[in-house]
Amino acid sequence: MSRPELHVFADARALTAAAVARWVAACHHAVAKRGRFVVALAGGGTPLAAYRQLAERHDLPWERVVVTWGDERLVPLDHEERNERSAREALLSHVGVHDEHVLGWGEGDDATLLARAHERRLREALGDPPRFDLVLLGLGADAHTASLFPGTRSVHAPGLATASTAPDGRARLTLTPRALSGAEEVLVLVSGADKRDALRRTLRREGDEDALPLTALTPPEAFVILADAQAAPSPPADGVAVEG
Ligand code: 6PG
């Protein structure tokens, strides 16, 4: 499956509830089938509400969960912009994920070296190529996803992990479309009117992969976009019903 299916929700609260429900279902399915649940978290602000709700789900088999991130900022671990720090505060510090099952991008100044090390880390822990049960992503107002930015060559980077540069010039680290496509389910969370244009262009493929990085992903199974009504094209593309 390479074209994502769109689910539209009345508001961010309903979108978050749907994201949590999908996480819970994917987690139980993966643990039952393979004995563990491997998830790549998204950075940014949209998923934080879901992470906080999951932090209260002590019924989940957290000791079977393996966590990494689809992308990271080249800042120290304790920096407020670090995706790993945000996820630890919102979720990981509240649940029983084992330290050795948290596969962060590491710290340092050389993005290329960090990307190469992370690629090795993922291959060793998750197989070659690494496979994820769930990849969470966001969408920027400029249509970037993870740290794959329009107009940069990061979309075509070989391998699984690469250095990239955000429009503000800040160095980033990101999994490549090839790595992100190695997932049983890719779930993209899109909230807010500022995302509407990027989501519309992405759904309608009004540009190539360099302009619309999410279109470079080709997950074989589930490729799902959860959007609130503020972000969804109006009327929703292909008569998509508003849920929740
Ligand atoms: C990051 C994210 C990035 C994010 C989008 C949307 O490190 O910033 O990986 O791709 O998902 O920028 O961010 P918001 O959820 O804050 O709108």
Image (tube, rainbow, N blue to C red):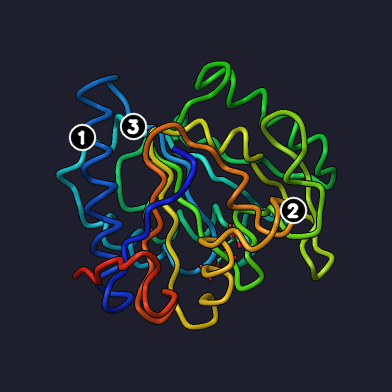
N-terminal label among 3 and 2: 3
Vertical relation: 117 (above or below) 78? above
Indicate the position of residue 120 as horizontal and vertical percent values. Answer: 67, 23
**Residue at mark 2:** 210
Q: Amino acid at mark 3?
A: Phe
Judge the density around disc 2: few (<14), some (14-19), many (≥20) Cα neighbours within 10 Å. Answer: some
Indicate the position of residue 43 as horizontal and vertical percent values. Answer: 54, 58
Is the C terminus in the top left, top right, bottom left or bottom right quadrant? bottom left
| Circle 2: element type | loop
**Residue at mark 3:** 37
158 to the left or right of 15? right
- Examine the image and state in which quarter residue 114 appears: top right
**Is label 3 or label 2 in front?**
2
Q: Amino acid at mark 2?
A: Asp
Quadrant field for ligand 1: bottom right
Query: Which residue is rendered at x = 62% and y = 25% of the image?
Result: 121
Q: Amino acid at mark 1?
A: His
Q: Outermost residue toward the front?
A: 238
